Amino acid sequence: MRVGSEVYRGENVLVATGSVSTLIPALEPGGRILTSELALELDEIPQRVIVLGGGVIGVEFASLWRSFGVDVTIIEALPRLVPNEDEAMSKGLERAFRKRGIGMHLGARLASATQRDTSVAVRLEDGTELVADYLLVAVGRRPRTATVGLAESGVTLDGDFVVVDEDLRTTADGVWAVGDIVRGLQLAHRSFAQGVFVAERMAGLPARAVPERQIPRVTYSDPEIASVGSTLAEAVTELGEDGVTSFDYNLAGNARSEIIGTGGLVRIVRAVDGPVIGVHLIGARVGELIAEAQLVVGWEAHPDDIAPYVHAHPTQSEALGEAFLALAGRPLHAL
């Protein structure tokens, strides 16, 4: 394998070239138009920012800037923020953001953006006009594969993504691929786990890949969103309305959440008379709770299996425990 002027030889090659910000042809980055990479290089705290994209990257930057006192407005083409999360989490985040003074235009599409010397003017398709110091384009990330020479090496691509089998092998002998260049969740911990899995397979060790649905997801905004498994809508699509039940536990009933001053929600989704298939949380620090939820979903545990276990008081983990108790028919502080 040739990298620049260097040639490397071996039985296996692992490709993990990562991703870059997705660009919009009419919005050339630079000056007052930023990608997430350029936003991290700013040497000032702006007064006003428009964020194009209400997914994970967009809401994380919006939350961060608002914490610094920036006037932030999010533009999202879909009807809700973080549209890949459970709808209850989206609605909770929208309420929290409005309370924090973050503006939103949901179900709105960009018509144009014009750079000026000290500002950028944005016009939406409905005629709304906005002006800010910067426009952050946060509409996703794409694999960094275009200039790597993969196709010339016999690696099949699907668009910019590398085609792999269930063991993350590509169509070229001895070449494996992991991370953002493999279609699926673009998360650092997914990439780490895939890298470990491939390294173990290369070494001839027994290894098992974690199914995509069992990988935890965290949005690092204020409040945080953490989830694993199926959303309620996904579960209904897969199992039908009569095959799914769920329970929502409000963090207002959790002592530790009251102590740290956060509201929020825990939503547990289960198959009727079956295992827990999805756990979704919103609130401060809830990303720290998702490890327990991953075990529950990964081990296909029933609420009755978890209900007997004791959660320390006062901790936010009690909110998970009480939600599992309620789904097991043994509610403690919930009806």
Image (spheres, helix red, strand yellow):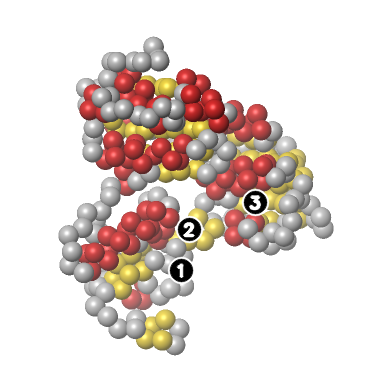
Give the residue type that dot 2 points to: Arg
> What residue would you read off at disc 3?
136
> Is 7 positioned to the left or the right of 69 in the image?
left
Pair 1/3: label in front: 3
Instruction: Tell me the quarter of the image containing the C terminus.
Output: top left
Residue 146 — which label? 1
Q: In which quarter of the image is residue 322?
A: top left
Give the residue type that dot 1 points to: Ala
Residue appearing at x 65%, y 29% in the figure? 99
Q: Is mark 2 on a helix, strand or loop?
A: strand
Q: How far apart are marks 1 and 2 (CA)?
A: 10 Å
Q: Residue 244 location, x and y as percent?
A: 29, 24
Asked if residue 84 shows in the view, the reply is no
> What residue would you read off at disc 2?
142
Contact between marks 1 and 2 (CB within 8 A): the answer is no
Q: In which quarter of the image is residue 334?
A: top left
Q: Residue 128 location, x and y as percent?
A: 73, 37
Give the residue type that dot 3 points to: Leu
